[in-house]
Amino acid sequence: MKLEILPQELSVYQVADLNLVDLTQQPLFIGVTAEEISIVSATDNVPTDTLEREDGWKGFKIEGVLEFSLVGILAKIASLLADANISIFAISTYNTDYVLIKANKYEAAIVALRAGGYTVV
């Protein structure tokens, strides 16, 4: 299975109002619940007025469209990285999954994933 490296540094943050966020940017992941509005986007596009913010993330995209019937794809990646003492922030979309890693563990994550049989491009 191939994992595509996302080129930009990413941030995870919270805002009080979605109007603060440029909804045309890519990548952009939004989670809205009764408790929060959480966003993941390129660090360069984070608005100045955030409630909470954590920078320093890098990401992988699982290449291709994943059928909903597939089982264990994200679990295998998470397990390989957990064995290497690397935590993840996972995001799923309709088509595929994304795995975010803190930038200081990113190279170690690439090594662990390649050792686990993944192609990282």
Image (spheres, grey):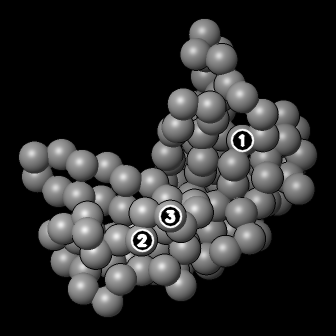
Give the x, y percent position of residue 47.
35, 83
Q: Looking at the figure, which quarter contains the N terminus?
A: top right
Of the numbered discs 1 and 2, the one sitting upstream in the chain is 2
**Which one is nearer the viewer's eye here, 43 or 70?**
43
Q: Give the SS element for disc 2.
A: loop
Residue most toward the bottom?
A: 48
**Which disc number belongs to residue 62?**
1
Q: Mark 1 and mark 2: span between their CA atoms?
A: 25 Å
Q: Is residue 34 left or right of residue 105?
A: left
Residue in front for this viewpoint, 42 or 17: 17
Q: Are marks 3 and 1 in contact (CB under 8 Å)?
A: no
Secondary structure of the residue carrying tag 3 is loop
Distance, label 3 to label 1, CA atoms, is: 22 Å
Residue type at numbered disc 1: Ile
Q: Horizontally, is 108 left or right of 36 in the view?
A: right
Contact, CB < 8 Å: mark 1 with mark 2? no
Question: Are dots 2 and 3 in contact, CB under 8 Å?
Answer: yes
Q: Can you tell which of label 1 and label 2 is closer to the viewer?
A: 2
In this view of the protein, which residue sits in the foreground, 80 or 3? 3
Number of numbered markers? 3
Q: Which residue is mark 3?
A: 24
Q: Would you say 16 lies left or right of 88 here?
A: left
**Amino acid on which the number 2 mark rests in the picture:** Asp
In terms of sequence position, does the residue under pointer 3 or pointer 1 come before the other? 3
Most foreground residue, 32 or 100: 32
Which kind of residue does numbered mark 3 sit on?
Answer: Thr
Considering only vertical position in the picture, is 44 above or below 73? Answer: below
Q: Which residue is mark 2?
A: 22
Percent position (x, y) of residue 118?
Answer: 84, 42
Tell me the quarter of the image containing the C terminus: bottom right
